[in-house]
Amino acid sequence: MPDTDAPPGPADPDRPDSAHASPADLKASGDPDVSERHAILVDPADKRERVDRLLVKNLPTLSRSRLQGLITTGQLSVDGKTIDNPAFRVKPGQKLLLEVPPAVAAEPEAQQIDLDIVFEDPYLIVIDKPAGMVVHPAPGNLDGTLVNALIGHCGESLKGIGGVRRPGIVHRLDKDTSGLIVAAKTEAVHQALTELFAARDIERAYQAVIWGAPSPAKGEIEGNIGRSLRNRKKMAVVRRGGKSALTRYQTLKSYAQGAVSLIECRLMTGRTHQIRVHLTEKGHPLVGDPVYGRVSDAKLQRLPPDARLAFRNFRRQALHARILGFKHPITGKTLKFESKLPPDIKELISSLESV
């Protein structure tokens, strides 16, 4: 999906007489994440106007709250840079591009999908999620999600918990991150678990296979995380704005003279892509990460010949949510769950241990 420029069409956003191109002219082609695009050239009369107000004036079919939501989720770029602040002040001559995702169904449907249930009682359920399963429905992934599976398993009463689109979901794992996730089965438990996460009173430990060997072998990575200014689909450590984030890590084992390491990360905060972004910032992206850690020939050459093929063909970030612990909101009992590394990550490590 292009990040900066509107696709070609009858209107040319570089010309003053085409300050606004219609959705039909800028209709996305072949991108399931985009329903329509709007290109706007800022007029001198709009100098220092808030960007959300300017969009309201140019796009009367979209409410201001809807536009603000699109902005904060990274759907707006100004001169090719992602802007996620509705109060951003525009300048004459700037080119705005707003991408609107397609509408989704109001409520997810129940689906009978096998789940690896680690724990369940009348109040909550803990799942060992496989890599490749999306947590909640979104454009491009409207079914086959964990939410669809939970409604199918727990019943229609789950739909109203925590919001229409994310029934029961308290936290999330990326599609290609495997491991433990908890969901609430009542509104009271959902609220209580949400408060535990907000208070950081949750034990969460992840294991990851990364490129290189961190120095020091044990430490902290701290840096605010916000949307990347260069690519709205990515997060990044930002100097201004963003949300504070802290990741603690320790190296469990290094392989091939430090070419690859197995580490454990513990989250002190829960930001989008936090582990992936922090480790990339430190210079040690996750093996297999298609967004933050693409494989290079230089990295592969440091591996034993028999391991290179396994690493080249690993198609998802090597990240697994291994430990999840918290105090049960109803019984008061301290719960702690552990999940073994999945076969694909085990095989990755074995390709190094066998040589």
Image (tube, grey):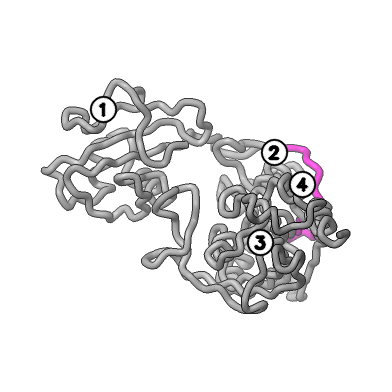
Per the image, the residue denoted by label 3 is 211
Q: Is residue 81 left or right of residue 236?
A: left
Q: Which residues are magenta?
A: 111-127
Compared across the picture, whether 233 is left or right of 126 comes to left
User: Residue 151: x, y in percent?
Assistant: 71, 44
Residue 10 lies in the magenta-colored region: no
**Nearer the camera: disc 3 or disc 1:** 3
Name the residue tied to disc 4.
309
Provide the residue designation for mark 1: 12
Marks 1 and 2 close (CB-CB < 8 Å)? no
Does residue 150 show up? no
Indicate which disc, 1 or 2, sits on the residue closer to the N terminus. Answer: 1
Q: Amino acid at mark 1?
A: Asp
- Which-is-in-front pick, marks 1 and 2? 1
> Vertically, is 321 above or below 50?
below
What amino acid is labelled 3 in the image? Trp
Reading the chain from its start, which is encountered first: label 4 or label 3?
Answer: 3
**Mark 3 touching mark 1, by CB under 8 A?**
no
Label 3 and label 1: CA atoms lie apart by 44 Å
Nearest the viewer among 311 and 160 is 311
Mark 3 closeness class: few <14, some 14–19, many ≥20 residues within 10 Å: many
Q: How far is disc 4 from disc 2 in space, using C-alphas?
A: 30 Å
* Residue situated in front as seen by the camera: 228 or 187: 228
Q: CA distance from mark 1 to mark 4?
A: 47 Å
Locate residue 54: give its quadrant: top left
User: Is 245 situated left or right of 76 in this image?
Assistant: right
Residue at 41% across, 50% down: 230
Q: Name the secondary structure under disc 3.
A: strand
